[in-house]
Image (cartoon, grey):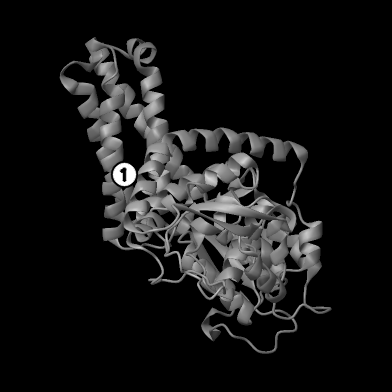
Amino acid sequence: MIRIFHHYVHRAALRSMLFDLGLALLVAIAAISLQAGGFDQAVPLAGGHVVSFAACLLVINSASGLYEVTPMGSLSRACARAVLVLLVALPLAYAIFGLLPVDLARHGVVQFSVMTGVSALVMRRVYISHWPTAPRARTRILIFGAGPTAVIVGNTLTSTDPNASIVGYVAGPNETATSVPAAELLAMQGSLSETAATLGVDEIVIALTERRSGSMPLRELLDCKLAGIKVYDLNSHFEKTLGQIRVDYLSASWLIFGEGFNQGALRTIVKRLFDLVSATVLSIVSSPLMLATALLIKLESRGPVLYRQERTGLHGKSFFVTKFRSMRTDAEKDGKPRWASANDDRVTRVGQIIRRLRIDELPQLFNVLKGDMSLVGPRPERPFFVDQLTQEIPFYAVRHSVKPGVTGWAQVRYHYGSTVEDSQEKLQYDLYYVKNHTLFLDLVVLLETVGVVLTGKGAR
């Protein structure tokens, strides 16, 4: 993993993005150079077109999830993503390169050459997603611990990172009972640093169940770090690997003394300017869609098109969020707040569509312009549930240190939550966002939101 503006990005994903960007530029420039009669002629005439298309292709590929680094999934899913990318990228290529000067755009040679190249690039990406990582390219990880916590760490790495190679587990000094398979337990070969060097370890994750005096060999861990081996505690491991901060292993001291959680004036100003510009543009672009949605809601059922509901925002202050009405007007006729659930019978037919496509969220752009919300941030929750969740989940109130968002890191990483357990899972992503939020992370979230909207993932 590599950290870019406080956000962890997998090295393999970054390499794939840069390779595809370079390949797209090369294909387009080559096609135009052949038509123009030379490289020196192509760049002045079509350089802007090439860069614009390459950037658009990078955004489309990223939003579709083609660069996700996960264990090999189904081939049909990868092909479905590729088809989605091509449905957008090929017409875009034809349109952009159709704007070239007449001499270059004649006969459509450049357009079809670029479209062919893009098709090959996307198919290559599908193939690579089912191409096992070479052993020498994997990160060799030693887990220091052999209890239940170590098992969780091992399962996390196995299920999320195909480039991670667990060399084994080493039991801590005070761990008398082990939970990992005996075959995966390693005997110490001298000190911990000597053992790690012998095994060619790149990283060590501290996953001790028992942490009392004598459990942590600090001197040996320092020797490992000085030898160039990365050493991570549990919180840092989950933050890096899963993009979340696990509540069950979290202490207040880690939040206080660790880096992050910076809410400086400059960051606030930059985020507000970004929100204003983005919300204004999105409001204008989506206005025809919002008008059509309002008409459909009105035609289907009696009642208001919009509904306003009290939510908890920055520093725990209440505000009223505005959304398109997607449920019957008597959805809570008994006056008791209820979470939305899968196949909720209170949702109207139009409501099912606009919730799946997230169109019901669009009026929240006006909350962003007003200043109650941000474009990206934790999901605003109702005060009734906030009171309940604050009592039951540690550190829940930390999420209110930033403005709530129309979309957010938790929303794109976890399905819609309807239980306390779901809320805890989402909080762990919210804590990651609060700790590391930057304009870069906001852009990442917005890209992933496009993918969520296109696939309807997590909608209720």
Q: Where is residue 256 in the image (x, y as percent from the top left)?
A: 81, 59
Note whether residue 168 is visible.
no
Viewer-closest of 153 and 361: 361
Is residue 326 shown above or below 172?
Answer: above
Which amino acid lies under the numbered mark 1 shown in the image of this protein?
Answer: Val
Q: Where is residue 173 in the image (x, y as percent from the top left)?
A: 74, 81
Viewer-closest of 227 and 403: 403
Q: Is mark 1 on a helix, strand or loop?
A: helix
Q: Which residue is identified by label 1?
A: 85
Label 1 crowd (10 A; few <14 / some 14-19 / many >=20): many
Residue placed furthest toward the right: 213
Is residue 94 shown above or below 129?
Answer: above
Q: Where is residue 198 in the image (x, y as percent from the top left)?
A: 62, 66
In the image, what residue occupies the spot 47% across and 43% down?
15
Left or right: 296 as drawn, with respect to 274: left
Find residue 112 and report its image quarter.
top left
Left or right: 246 as drawn, with respect to 356: right
Q: How many labels does the image show?
A: 1
Q: Position of residue 123 (x, y in %)?
A: 27, 46
